[in-house]
């Protein structure tokens, strides 16, 4: 009892719990109701894309409290970053929480990030932009860090899939992304920081990738690659799919076969669960998932049980949500919570 009392006092000092009255009496002294305070700390996550930036503020359970879109195209000039940071500061000031209650800001970027979260170690998707953490920190009032957007998205999906231990998250975004998570932790490589599934080679003579090599998964399985093949907007393309137009169906089936090949290549190394998310996720129907599962089974060298991928729980908000959740997770771990028990 003294140990429990001491722990409760520590959590109360951190404003992590509050007392919510008394339970009904069962014959003795009425028991106190002790509640967790989800708004004890707030975290802010940002996804920085070429076309816009998504900003979310979340509580300690990962619930989104407020969100906004900075609807401006990324530019390399100083004015863009200054105006963007002013927008972020205004977003923070409009939150009904003091600064000392906000854990900070994590910015998800489309590139590999140093372990310290201070700069990009690989930047090919923002070719005209040269920035690092200081670019934002000089204007933003709260502490900031950078994170690879695929890592952030995978972390959000793992958070919302508490039954999964090992998984591969495949982001079917404008630019493809993928991350391996083992025992609910992102696998960190020796040099590449995290998984870069998008640059696995499917065909050495395939299309030219932005990395400078040919035939990467990016060139076959990204939303950009699909739209290039379709020759129209993806909304129009999936309209043709639902109308069963033969030319569109041929392109879509080829896309799914290439995605199945990617999945089977990964499964030859590690047999785990797969989650499909990103920009294309809202377009995926149950029929599409059945088709994909069939192509995975057909392409597998071994007899296997029915392959069933999960659909993303977070959709297009995965990267911004996951970025904020990194800050929440770090705070809870520093506070001494068992993250496996919480999720």
Image: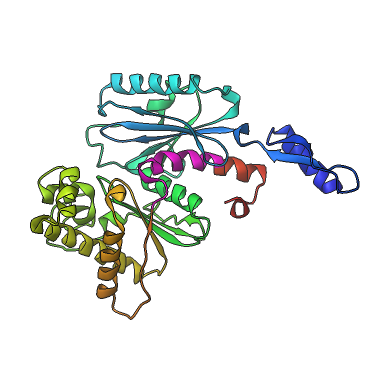
Of residues 27 and 202, the one drawn nearer to the viewer in this rendering: 27
Count of numbered tags: 0
202 vs 83, left or right, is left
211 vs 311, left or right, is left
| Residue at (26, 33) in percent of width and height | 51
Give the vertical position of 157 relative to 262 (above or below): above
Image location of residue 232, percent across then percent down: 12, 44
Image location of residue 290, percent across then percent down: 29, 65
Image location of residue 59, percent across then percent down: 55, 36
Residue 325 lies in the magenta stretch: yes
Residue 217 lies in the magenta stretch: no
Give the vertical position of 8 relative to 92 (above or below): below
Colouring of the image: rainbow
Residue at the bottom extreme, as displayed: 303
Residue 96 seen in this snapshot: yes
Residue 210 seen in this snapshot: no
Q: Quadrant of residue 132?
A: top left
Most common secondary structure along the magenta stretch? helix
| Residue at (8, 57) in percent of width and height | 247
| Residue at (70, 33) in percent of width and height | 14
Image location of residue 317, percent across then percent down: 39, 40
Residue at the right extreme, as displayed: 28
Q: In which quarter of the image is residue 241?
A: bottom left
From which residue to which does the magenta span run? 312-328
Of residues 196 and 4, the one drawn nearer to the viewer in this rendering: 4
| Residue at (30, 36) in percent of width and height | 49
């Amino acid at each position: 009892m003294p140990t429990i009392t001491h722990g409760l006092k520590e959590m109360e000092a951190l404003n992590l719990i509050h007392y919510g009255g008394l339970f009904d009496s069962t014959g003795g002294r009425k028991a106190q109701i002790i509640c967790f305070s989800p708004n004890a700390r707030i975290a802010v996550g940002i996804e920085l894309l070429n076309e816009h930036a998504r900003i979310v503020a979340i509580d300690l359970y990962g619930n989104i409290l407020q969100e906004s879109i900075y609807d401006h195209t990324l530019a390399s000039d100083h004015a863009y970053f200054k105006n963007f940071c002013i927008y972020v500061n205004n977003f923070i000031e409009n939150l009904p929480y003091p600064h000392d209650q906000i854990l900070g800001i994590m910015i998800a970027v489309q590139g590999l990030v140093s372990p310290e979260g201070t700069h990009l170690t690989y930047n090919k998707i923002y070719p005209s932009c040269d920035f690092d953490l200081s670019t934002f920190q000089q204007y933003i009032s709260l502490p900031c860090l950078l994170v690879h957007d695929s890592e952030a998205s995978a972390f959000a999906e793992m958070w919302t899939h508490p039954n999964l231990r090992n998984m591969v998250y495949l982001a079917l975004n404008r630019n493809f992304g993928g991350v391996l998570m083992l025992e609910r932790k992102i696998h960190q490589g020796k040099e590449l920081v995290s998984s870069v599934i998008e640059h696995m080679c499917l065909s050495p003579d395939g299309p030219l990738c932005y990395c400078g090599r040919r035939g990467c998964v990016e060139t076959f399985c990204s939303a950009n690659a699909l739209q290039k093949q379709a020759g129209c907007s993806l909304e129009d393309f999936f309209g043709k799919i639902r109308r069963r137009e033969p030319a569109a169906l041929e392109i879509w089936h080829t896309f799914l076969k290439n995605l199945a090949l990617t999945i089977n290549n990964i499964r030859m190394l590690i047999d785990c669960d797969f989650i499909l998310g990103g920009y294309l996720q809202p377009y995926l129907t149950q029929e599409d998932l059945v088709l994909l599962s069939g192509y995975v089974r057909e392409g597998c060298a071994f007899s296997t049980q029915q392959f069933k991928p999960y659909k993303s729980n977070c959709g297009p908000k995965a990267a911004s949500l996951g970025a904020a959740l990194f800050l929440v997770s770090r705070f809870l771990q520093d506070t001494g919570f068992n993250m496996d028990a919480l999720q």
